[in-house]
Image (cartoon, rainbow, N blue to C red):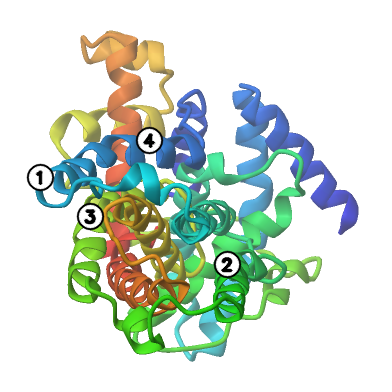
Amino acid sequence: MRGREDEWTGLMRSAMAGDDAAYHRLLRAVTPVLRAAARRGLARAGQPPDQAEDIVQEILLAVHLKRHTWDSEAPFAPWLFAIARNKLIDALRRRGRRIFVNIDDFAETLPGEAPQETASAGEVATQLGTLPQRQRDVLQSIAVESASIKDTAAKLSMSEGAVRVALHRGLAALTAKLRDH
Amino acid sequence: MDTDQLIRSLAADNAHRMPRVGAMLTMALLVAAPLSILIFATFLGVRPDVMTAMHNPFFDMKFAVTLSLAIPAIIVSLHLSRPEALMRGWGWLLLLPVGLLAVAIGSEAMMAPAMPMTMRLVGKNSRVCLVAIPAMSLPLLAGALFGLRHGAPSHPALAGALAGLVSAGLAATLYASHCTDDSPLFVATWYTLAAALVAAIGAAVGSKVLRY
């Protein structure tokens, strides 16, 4: 457990220093832990576990947009779990349940409990459809078609800078829509 | 969109850098301050006898009290803008102005009273104080909330209340240079009421706008 969390902290430091691959690895590494915790939280609230992926995606978006609040001298896991807990509580509250979410839900993931498969989620996809055309095209190209920023710029006849701006605005808008819907 | 696809788009956006919350808060307060100063200059202004008042330690004490509210409130609000932050170990900072006031009230009580206590308490400006401090706070409160929106507070209402204390402390610093009531009893009563009002507004608005 300790080793895993130290590895996360190291990856996040590299990510903040500009290493996109480290960031990608980190997000992939934390996702199964978040998914297991979301399932447990839903189960405890008597909700079907199939909404877990929506919650996972919301957590990942919040992690991304708030990563400047992480102090690179501090361990990454407590910061991550605080955001996850906050988002899980929000999600359960929106579904009409008030429940105490235990921080240990995140820290104590049993090995083998976390399903590795990636599931698709409905909410992000739905909100994606309400974004401005430009942002939607850019997100579609980068996320779904796994094109690079450069290729996306060429394909959509935009500058790379404009693609970056549209990507970031799209992600920020998605997060706001998920929070407020 | 499946989660792997979302992660791919997040990683592609890794180059995007946000300013630290402290930088955003500073900038937002600097943008808001001229509005509060405009309210001050238009309706209040510095008291005419300010040169002599500066020799009165109780006049100077007002600034110590208001700044000892504003500065710790800034520090604590920045601390709480981190999602994993706890109030534990930080709350005492907010007691600094209370301690200063207690000392000031004590020293005033030991001196020969220039005025009866009720006059020192009620003063001549209690109503102005209750209107002016919140009014000058509002632009600063909007700025503080805007700046703190870049954070990720786990308790948005608490963070909003602190934004209220930040703005009330700064507005009260302006107001202190206008007000001719220098008794610590007056400050402890009316400044506190005004700050509590602004903190309540901050908590109510913060619980909506500081969710992330």
Residue at figure coordinates x 69%, y 37% from the top left: A12
Q: Are marks 1 and 3 on the same chain?
A: yes
Q: Which mark is residue B136?
A: 3
Q: Amino acid at mark 1?
A: Thr
Q: Residue furthest left?
A: B42
How many angstroms separate mark 1 from mark 3 (CA)? 11 Å
Label 3 resides on the chain identified as B
How many angstroms separate mark 3 from mark 2 (CA)? 21 Å
How many angstroms separate mark 4 from mark 1 (CA)? 57 Å
Q: Amino acid at mark 4?
A: Val
Total marks placed: 4
Is label 1 in a helix, a strand or a loop? helix
Q: Tell me the crowding category of disc 1: few under 14, some 14 to 19, or many 20 or more residues within 10 angstroms, Cα based.
A: few
Left or right of residue B120: residue A4: right
How many angstroms separate mark 4 from mark 3 (CA)? 50 Å
Q: Tell me the crowding category of disc 3: few under 14, some 14 to 19, or many 20 or more residues within 10 angstroms, Cα based.
A: many
Q: Which residue is mark 2?
A: B94
Q: Are marks 1 and 2 on the same chain?
A: yes
Residue at figure coordinates x 66%, y 70% from the top left: B92
Q: Which mark is residue B42?
A: 1
Q: Which residue is mark 4?
A: A144
How many angstroms separate mark 1 from mark 2 (CA)? 31 Å
